[in-house]
Amino acid sequence: MISLIERGESSPTAVVLDKLAAGLGVTLASLFAEQKNAAAQPLMRRADQRVWRDPDSGYLRRNLSPSSFPSPIELVEVIMPAGVRVAYDTGRRSVGVSQQIWIVEGEIEVSLGDETYRLLMGDCLCMDIEQPTIFRNLSDQPARYLVALATDTKFPARQRFT
């Protein structure tokens, strides 16, 4: 499957990409980062931001952060269509990853293990992504939200969230 993705012969789903990222010990956003030989630039123009659409759910993911600039923070914009559900069941990663979601438009429901949160416009949720996570847009309107990810290679993820 990985070689099909690398050759552009298969379009992986968000769930498959999350499993690959977990196996590699990186964030999902880093899989979309372009590897460039040029000097790192702190600015990423909207026209240059990588956009990906999940073939299963139709959700749109835009990497906002400059991929070549060294930073422990990554910003991602997600537009989730009405009625969509995306479930991630990945486990531990080799680096700690903190994630926050801020709802810009619409509403979503997020289940983290046994806890479920209904997020409305303006709400922000801090997340432990080391447990099964389900995103649902139960409304009849698309939802748009910002994902902020911070990585910490000094501490394993479980130590930071216990």
Image (spheres, helix red, strand yellow):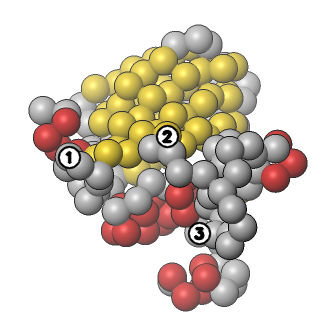
Lower position in the chain sequence, tag 1 or tag 2: 2
Tag 2, which secondary structure?
strand
The amino acid type, in three-letter code, at marker 2 is Ile
Residue position marked by numbered label 1 in the rendering: 155
Q: What whole-number distance in Å separates the C-alpha atoms at marks 1 and 2? A: 16 Å
Residue at x-position 59% and y-position 11%: 122
Q: Is residue 55 visible?
A: no
The amino acid type, in three-letter code, at marker 3 is Pro
Tag 3, which secondary structure?
loop
Residues 26 and 12: in front is 26
Residue 12 badge:
3
Is residue 116 rendered to the left or right of residue 158?
right
Q: Quadrant of residue 145?
A: top right
Tell which tag, 3 or 2, sits nearer the viewer. Answer: 2
Residue position marked by numbered label 2 in the rendering: 73
Q: Quadrant of residue 92?
A: bottom left
Residue 142 image position (x, y, % from top left)? 72, 30
